[in-house]
Amino acid sequence: MTILKINKLAVKDGNFAELEKRFAQRKHSVDQEPGFEGFELLRPTGEGQEHYFVITRWADEESFQAWAAKRSPRDPNTTVSRAEGTLSFEVVDLPEIEESGY
């Protein structure tokens, strides 16, 4: 079952362009990981919104955990964002049901 991981990133000092540049430079770095299905970087658009969200799709929790275990922590002195939590979801595979007129 596909799972989603959504990471909330606070961007330091409005470094939005730099954050996007860094994601662009490594956007295919996870492509070959077993179970990885894709990712999206969401840019804030509302007034006063300063958080980006990174959505990754994985075939299952085990694939995500295997990838996460291999990651090295980033040096906080060189990052332009700070992680503020991760949300986890399963994608619900809805069955086909005949409409019964509600």
Image: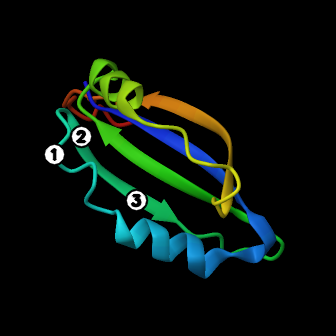
Residue type at mark 1 is: Gln
Residue under numbered circle 3: 40
- Residue 32: x percent and y percent? 15, 45
- Between disc 2 and disc 1, the foreground one is 1
Task: Residue at 56% x, 44% y: name it.
Answer: 7
Relative height, residue 94 to residue 15 (above, below):
above
- Identify which residue, 99 or 84, lies in the foreground: 84
Task: Give percent across and percent down for residue 91.
Answer: 35, 32
Within 10 Å of disc 1 (Cα), the crowding (few <14, some 14-19, many 20+) is few
Disc 1 + disc 3, Cβ < 8 Å: no
In the depicted view, which residue is nearer to us: 48 or 70?
70
Q: State the CA–CA distance, disc 2 to disc 1.
A: 7 Å
Where is mark 1, residue-wise?
32
Q: Comparing marks 1 and 3, which lies closer to the viewer?
A: 1
Crowdedness of circle 3 by 10 Å Cα count: few (<14), some, many (20+)? few
Q: Are marks 2 and 1 in contact (CB under 8 Å)?
A: yes
Among numbered discs 1 and 3, the one appearing first in the sequence: 1
Residue 28: which quarter of the image? bottom left
Picture quarter with the N terminus: top left
Q: CA distance from mark 2 to mark 3?
A: 12 Å
47 shown above or below 4: below
The quadrant the C terminus occupies is: top left
